[in-house]
Amino acid sequence: MKYFLLLGVISSLLFSAELQPRSVIEASGNVQQVAFVDGNIIAGTSAGTLEVYKLSDATKLSKIEFPKIKDFTGDEVSPKIFSVDMLEKTLLAVVQATNGSRELYLVEDGKPKVLIDSKANLFISKAKFVDKNRILVALLSNEMLLWDVKNKKEIYRIQPNPSHFSDFALNESKTMAASSCESGEITLFDALSGKIIKVLKGANVDNVYKVDFKKEKVLCAGQDRRGIVYDVSSSAYDRFDGSFLLYAGALSPSLKFAAFAFNEQNDIVLFDLASKSKAHTLKGQKSTLNTIVFANDKELVSSSDDQFIMIWRLP
C-alpha cells in the first residue's frame, strides 16, 4: 500500500512539474507568428523572412527573404510577416507593404508570387488555406473573405461582428471557422459558404486575442485574463483565470490539454480538461507570448515577441 501511495505521489509531482524547452530556435528577427504543418514549423519574422524548421531536430529547412519596403518616413525597412501557413509544399504569407498596406503571397519552389497586392487596399490580418485553391482571409475591419486562387477573385465576403478583428481558427477538416474580436464573442461560420452557424458568448467580456478550434471545442485567450474552452454543441464553457492578459492559447489534438500564456513571467500553463487542474507549467519564453501550437499531444511549439521559438516535450 505504501509503495502504491509513494508511486502516486511521485507520478503527481512529475506530472505537474515545471518544464524547460526541449529545443530553442533563434530566428532571423522577432517572430510575428508560427504555424505547425506536417512536421514543420513555419515562422514569419519582423526581419522580412519566412522560415521553415523541422520539428524533430529544429534544423532550418528553408528561408525566404522578402525585399525591403519604404516606411512612412521614406526609409527602407524589412517588411513584417504577419501570418503564415503551409499546404503540402506551398507556403502562404501576409506581408507588410509600403505605407502600411499589406499583401498576400504564395511561395512555391522558393519563389514568392503575389496573390493580393497593395493596390487592393485590403488590410489583411491573417490568412489560412482551406484547400489548394481557396484561402480564408481576415481583414482588420473584421471582414472575412474566401479567395479563389485560380480565378483571382472573392467567392464571398462577410462581417461576422462589427467589432475590431482579433483572430480566427479553422477546425481540423477546414469546413468551419471560429472568429474572435474585441467584443469577446466568437462567431462560428461555414468556411466554404460564409454562412454564420452560431455565436458563442457570455464567457469573455473583452477582446479575445487568440482562438483555437479542435473537434467540438473552441479555446479563447482573453484580455480579461480569462481562458475559456467552449463546447460548440451546447455553448457551455469551462473558465481558467490567469494573472495577466492571456495573449495566446491552444488545444491539444485529443483535447486532453488546454494551454494558455498565463502570467507576466511568460509561463505557459497546461490544464487537464478532464480534471480542470493544472498539469504542466512551461518556463523559458522571455518576451510576451504571441503563439502556441500543439504538434501532437506530447509536443508543442511557442513563440514570443523576440527571436526565439521554443519546442516543448511533455513527460
Image: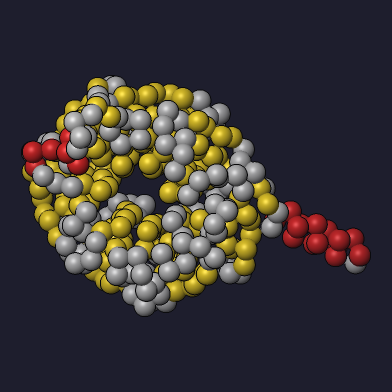
User: In x, y percent, where is residue 161?
Assistant: 21, 67
Asked whether, in this view, residue 46 is left or right of residue 22, the answer is: left
Residue 262 coordinates in the image, percent (x, y): 53, 59
Instruction: State the residue in front, 266 or 138.
Output: 266
Task: Pick whichever, 256 or 225, lies toward us.
Answer: 225
Work out whether residue 59 can be spotted: yes
Residue shown at 24%/37% (left/top)?
Answer: 96
Residue 116, position as x, y percentages in the image: 14, 38
Question: According to the image, what is the colour scheme of the structure?
Answer: secondary structure
Q: Is residue 207 left or right of residue 291?
A: left
| Residue 31 image-quadrant placement | top left
Residue at image x 31%, y 37%?
81
84 left or right of 226 in image: left
Q: Is residue 237 above or below residue 135?
A: below
Reply above or below: 157 against 124: below
Pick the front one: 204 or 11: 204
**Left or right of residue 136, residue 248 in this image:** right
Quadrant where the N terminus sits is: bottom right
Q: Please tell me which residue is depicted at 19% across the width and 67% down the height of the picture.
A: 162
Q: How many labels, in total?
A: 0
Q: Residue 258's x, y, as percent?
A: 51, 60
Residue closest to the far right: 2
Q: Is residue 104 above or below residue 281?
A: above
